[in-house]
Image (cartoon, helix red, strand yellow):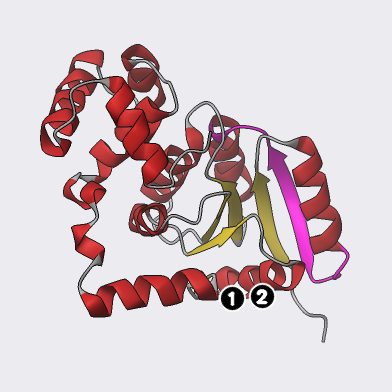
Amino acid sequence: MKTKLITLILIDDHPVVRAGYRYFLESTKKIMVLAEAGDGETGCVLYQECQPDMAIIDINMPGIGGLETIYRIKSKNPTANILALSMHSSEIMVKRVLDMGATGYLTKQCSPEQLLEAVHRISQGEPYIDAKLASNMLSDSVQGSGDKHPLHILSQREFQIFTLLAEGSSVLQIAEIISISPKTVGVHHASIMRKLGLQNTVQLVRLAIDCGLIRV
């Protein structure tokens, strides 16, 4: 009996990265890449058209970004299986991505074997997190230090806006990205600054760097 192929779509803004993933995954003869997208907006459209077993999404894309892409896909497809890939190993980012609805999380430093295992498990709806990241998160949970992270005080939407601000997006750009009014973005911005005790954007960016959310 012929084994059913795992179907997926790749959403990453780097063509070379997508090509590498496609070549490796399809070389197993067990996985079929139905489509590729270089941005989140296109990825959301392709997901609806293809209805794959899973999607692999780069968190650090320009445009609407990975978090909003996950949010939009999960809003229309609550059972969607999503593997988030990121250059960030920050535990707060891992937690927020999973809270947004991703089924699994790997850093882009993962081995090919890890990626393959993640695809097989996540395509079946099983969660998968890089072992080292999972161990760190469990340790923080046991020690009770996880919720002491300064960014845990932010709501999911506030965290999303925080990361966009730290990456240099303007209020108008953020409003367009997450489909809310500039006024609402401004309200969230003020709330973020108040909750975190920040006085200006420089302090916000410095905090994001300290938390491992952006690199310099």
Q: Is residue 81 visible?
A: yes
Residue 157's place in the image compared with 170, above or below, is below
Q: Residues within 10 Å of mark 1 (few under 14, many from 20)?
A: some
Query: For this view, does 41 lie left or right of residue 73?
Result: right
Q: Residue at x 25, y 14 (%)?
A: 182
Query: For this view, does 127 lie left or right of residue 170?
Result: right
Query: For this view, does 130 lie left or right of residue 169?
Result: right
**Res. 9 mark:** none
Q: Report which quarter residue 160 is drawn in.
A: top left
Residue 90's place in the image compared with 144, above or below, is above
Dot 2: element = helix
Residue 39 belongs to magenta span: yes
Q: Which residues are magenta?
A: 27-40
Q: Position of residue 89 (x, y in %)?
A: 50, 56
Q: Position of residue 5 (x, y in %)?
A: 75, 69
Q: Is residue 125 visible?
A: no
Q: Amino acid at mark 2?
A: Glu
Are discs 2 and 1 less than 8 Å apart at CB? yes
Task: Identify the residue position indicated by label 1 in the image.
Answer: 121
Foreground: disc 2 or disc 1: 2
Q: Amino acid at mark 1?
A: Arg
Q: Position of residue 175 (x, y in %)?
A: 33, 20
Viewer-nearest residue: 128 or 137 = 137
Q: Report which quarter residue 18 is drawn in.
A: top right
Residue 169 belongs to magenta span: no
Query: For this view, does 161 lie left or right of residue 124?
Result: left
Viewer-nearest residue: 90 or 44 = 90
Task: Identify the residue position indicated by label 2 in the image.
Answer: 117
